[in-house]
Structures are given as structure tokens and as C-alpha cells.
Image (cartoon, grey):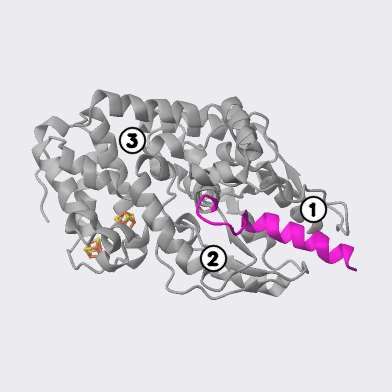
């Protein structure tokens, strides 16, 4: 497809990239069948191929319409299309560019724009999030169910002093802004398990956001500013050889992709590249460790950011089994649970439909617990089931302690 970029977008460096990505799509349609929104709605405009055509239209006309916003807003950025595209189309990069353009000249109403701004401010306001999630935990389950709110269960608090090896190396463990407010037990479990494996943990005080929240809403400058802040904090956190460990797969993919958010002549491009090269998902450190846990029947939900974003999940599943957990097979697992960052808040109807489909698959064989690897998925899934939903780190730590207590 040949794109004649509208003069309104002249001199925007990202537009050359957008044009190249649009051109790389050969319209084969292999991606449509694996796109969760196309599966749900059956509309070509809600498929990856249809969205690429819409973005091409936006680039050529220089005008954002409600049609562009409707169908591009519905995209989950799950990356399933990228995983299955034989031509290597960098779809999410293209969507990010389009979101920036949609923000410059929006078709949506002023209240809708304001609503998005307020949502972003609230989500990034750490003290408020801590208080909010603290109150949420205290609400009776019946109230949380009535209002479709997440159910956060308090899991075993971490202490890695039982059966630990001597500390032989150290890492920087990132808290993640929403995760550290909603489920601090996840990082406590991570720290405890890493200590069990002989890995010491350093953390960052008042850790900045990784930038994903703002960036994926099209606020590229704000997202980049968050990234620059976090880059500086990490650089000041000590030894530059220490791996940087993420326990939320959404933050992990954002950090591993840091360099692509900076132009090559940006002074922070090299720093972002150096930081990204050190980022690992916590599973990449723990897999291979000999950790035996008490048994439990588990449905393992693989977040898109782990599976498609980081190409991880299979080895983790094998390791969880090796630890002593029984991973039950999932029946026709759909692509995405519908969480997708702010998606579950901005597109709640679609998100709830996707969650229902995911729940049918996860609960078919009545597991004791559902585990996932990302805070957004954990909160979203937990609001749709009576079965406990945990981060896999919480479960492994809980069952490890249970195993020790049983001798
Ligand atoms: S699979 Fe790739 S090349 Fe084919 S239509 Fe989808 S994005 Fe385009
Ligand atoms: S990122 Fe996911 S929802 Fe968006 S077009 Fe690709 S497959 Fe569909």
C-alpha cells in the first residue's frame, strides 16, 4: 500500500516510520482470526488489517474522525496480530503513532478528553491509589461483586529467611506503580523467592512510572518524561551490571521496549538502550531454581504482555509444574482477558465480554486458583470469578511456605 502523507503531518519524523509500517502490510489477513476484537465483533474495521487501512486513511486525509477513534480505541494492543503476522508488521508501533495524531486533533468530545486526562492523573497519583486499594480490600465481597470491583486477597507476606542460600548476586527489583499500591504482596513474594535462590534485592524509593500508562493513551511526551525519570532513578540505584527485574509483565514489556520511544539523536536514547538490555522478567531469573512447593490445581493465565510482548510463558509453565503445581489444561483459551492497561476502564463493555470468554476457559476444570503475571489482568480477572486470582509469585511463595511447614 502506498501512502501519500497529508501535508499537515509534514516534518513529523515518526510519519516516515508509519508510512513504512503501513507499506509492509500485504493484506493477507492471517492476523484477523487471532484478533480478539475481530473474534468478538466480526467487523473488518475491528481487525488489525482493517485498523491499518484506517490509519492509512488518517495519514492521507490528515483528519481524525469518530470512525478512526472508535475502531482504534477498541484495539487492546495485545500484539496477537504481530505474533502471527508473516510479514513482521510492527502494528503496535503504528498504533502508537496514530494515537499521538488522534490526541493532536481529537474528534471526541471535550468531556471525553477531560475524562481521559483525569483518569491518567488518578492512576498515577500513588498515595491516592494506595488509599483506594486499601479501602477496596476492606469492602465486603458482596459489595465488590455487586459493583464488579476487583477482589484482592491478602496472601502470605514475604520473608525469605527460611532455607535461603547465601546471597551471591543482587538485582534491582521494580515495584510498578499500580502493583505496589494494589498488591504489594507480589513484590514481597518476589523478593523472598529470589532470596531463597540466593539473589539479593535492591529497590528504588519513590519509583517513577515506566511511562506505559501515558504513552499508550497517546500522551507521548508525558510518557517519555516518565521514562526519563525512571531511567535516572535506575542509574542512581547502584551497580550498572545488576539486572533490572520486573514482576508485572505490562511494565516489563514497556521497559524492554524503552529505546523505541526515543529518536536516535535524543541524548537519552543510549541510556534507554543500556537500561532495556538489563531488564528481565522475574520468571527469567527463577526458572531453573530448585523450589519445591505444596501441590495446588492451577489455571495459568498468560498475559498478552508476557506471551506476545516478551515471548515468555511456556518455560514458566513448565517450571511451575516442576515446582509441584498441577497446571490444568485450558479449554479454547481466547486471546486476551480484556484488561489491557486502561482498556478495562475505557472500554468496559468489550473488556467484560472478553473476560467472560477467558473465565469460561480458565474455570472449565474448577481450579483451586487462577494465576497470572500482570497486575492489570489480576485485578480485571478477579472481578469476574469467585475463584482466587493471584500473581504466580504469590502462589509459589505461599505453597513453598506451606510445603516447609508440612516438612
Ligand atoms: S498478517 Fe500482517 S501482513 Fe497480513 S494483513 Fe495482518 S498485518 Fe497485514
Ligand atoms: S493488537 Fe490485538 S486487538 Fe489490536 S489489532 Fe492486534 S490482535 Fe487485534
Segment tinted magenta in the rendering: 382-407
Secondary structure beneath label 3: loop
How many residues crowd around disc 3 within 10 Å: few (fewer than 14), some, or many (20 or more)? many
Going 67% across and 59% down the picture, which residue do you hit?
A: 285
44 vs 379: above or below: below
Decide: marks 3, 2 in contact (CB < 8 A)? no
- Residue 218, horizontal then vertical, whole percent: 33, 35
Secondary structure beneath label 1: helix
Going 45% across and 47% down the picture, which residue do you hit?
A: 257
What residue is disc 1 on? 195
- Residue 338, horizontal then vertical, whole percent: 41, 53
Q: Is residue 4 left or right of residue 41?
A: left
Does the segment drawn in magenta span residue 396?
yes
Question: In whole angstroms, how far apart are the C-alphas of marks 3 and 1?
Answer: 39 Å
Secondary structure beneath label 2: loop
102 vs 53: above or below: above
Question: In whole angstroms, how far apart are the C-alphas of marks 2 and 1?
Answer: 22 Å
- Image quarter (top left, top right, bottom left or bottom right) of the C terminus: bottom right
Q: In this view, does 243 lie to the left or right of 291?
A: left
What residue is disc 3 on? 218
| Label 2 CB sits under 8 Å from any ligand 2 atom | no
What residue is disc 2 on? 313
Residue 114 seen: yes
Decide: marks 2, 1 in contact (CB < 8 A)? no
Q: Which of marks 3 and 2 is nearer the N terminus?
A: 3
Q: Which of marks 3 and 1 is nearer the N terminus?
A: 1
Going 36% across and 31% down the picture, which residue do you hit?
A: 219
Amino acid at each position: 500500500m502506498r501512502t501519500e502523507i497529508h501535508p499537515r503531518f509534514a516534518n513529523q519524523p515518526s510519519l516516515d516510520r508509519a508510512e513504512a509500517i503501513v507499506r509492509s502490510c500485504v493484506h493477507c489477513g492471517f492476523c484477523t482470526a487471532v484478533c480478539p476484537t475481530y473474534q468478538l465483533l466480526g467487523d473488518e474495521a475491528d481487525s488489525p488489517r482493517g485498523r491499518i487501512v484506517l490509519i492509512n486513511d488518517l495519514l492521507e486525509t490528515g483528519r481524525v474522525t469518530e470512525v478512526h477513534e472508535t475502531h482504534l480505541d477498541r484495539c487492546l494492543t495485545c500484539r496477537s496480530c504481530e505474533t502471527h503476522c508473516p510479514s513482521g508488521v510492527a502494528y503496535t508501533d503504528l498504533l502508537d503513532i496514530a494515537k499521538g495524531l488522534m490526541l493532536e486533533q481529537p474528534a471526541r468530545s471535550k468531556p471525553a478528553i477531560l475524562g481521559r486526562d483525569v483518569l491518567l492523573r488518578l492512576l498515577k497519583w500513588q498515595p491516592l491509589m494506595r488509599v483506594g486499594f486499601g479501602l477496596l480490600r476492606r469492602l465486603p465481597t458482596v459489595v465488590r461483586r455487586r459493583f464488579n470491583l476487583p477482589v484482592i486477597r491478602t496472601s502470605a507476606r514475604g520473608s525469605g529467611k527460611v532455607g535461603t542460600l547465601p546471597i551471591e548476586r543482587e538485582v534491582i527489583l521494580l515495584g510498578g506503580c499500580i502493583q505496589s499500591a494494589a498488591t504489594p504482596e507480589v513484590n514481597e513474594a518476589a523478593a523472598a523467592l529470589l532470596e531463597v535462590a540466593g539473589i539479593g534485592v535492591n529497590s528504588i524509593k519513590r519509583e517513577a512510572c515506566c511511562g506505559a500508562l501515558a504513552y499508550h493513551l497517546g500522551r507521548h511526551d508525558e510518557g517519555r518524561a516518565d521514562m526519563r525519570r525512571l531511567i535516572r532513578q535506575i542509574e542512581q540505584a547502584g551497580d550498572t551490571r545488576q539486572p533490572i527485574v520486573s514482576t508485572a509483565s505490562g511494565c516489563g514489556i514497556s521497559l524492554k521496549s524503552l529505546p523505541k520511544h526515543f529518536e536516535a539523536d535524543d541524548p537519552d536514547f543510549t541510556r534507554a538502550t543500556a537500561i532495556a538490555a538489563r531488564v528481565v522478567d522475574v520468571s527469567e531469573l527463577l526458572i531453573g531454581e530448585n523450589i519445591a512447593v505444596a501441590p495446588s490445581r492451577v489455571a495459568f493465565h498468560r498475559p498478552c504482555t508476557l506471551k506476545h510482548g516478551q515471548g515468555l510463558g511456556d518455560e514458566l509453565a513448565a517450571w511451575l509444574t516442576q515446582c509441584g503445581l498441577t497446571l490444568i489444561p485450558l479449554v479454547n483459551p481466547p486471546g486476551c482477558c480484556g484488561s489491557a492497561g486502561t482498556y478495562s476502564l475505557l472500554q468496559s463493555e468489550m473488556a467484560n465480554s472478553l473476560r467472560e470468554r477467558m473465565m469460561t476457559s480458565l474455570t472449565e476444570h474448577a481450579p483451586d486458583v487462577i494465576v497470572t503475571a500482570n497486575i492489570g489482568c489480576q485485578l480485571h480477572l478477579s472481578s469476574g470469578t469467585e475463584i482466587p486470582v493471584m500473581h504466580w509469585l504469590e502462589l509459589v511463595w505461599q505453597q513453598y511456605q506451606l510445603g516447609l511447614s508440612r516438612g
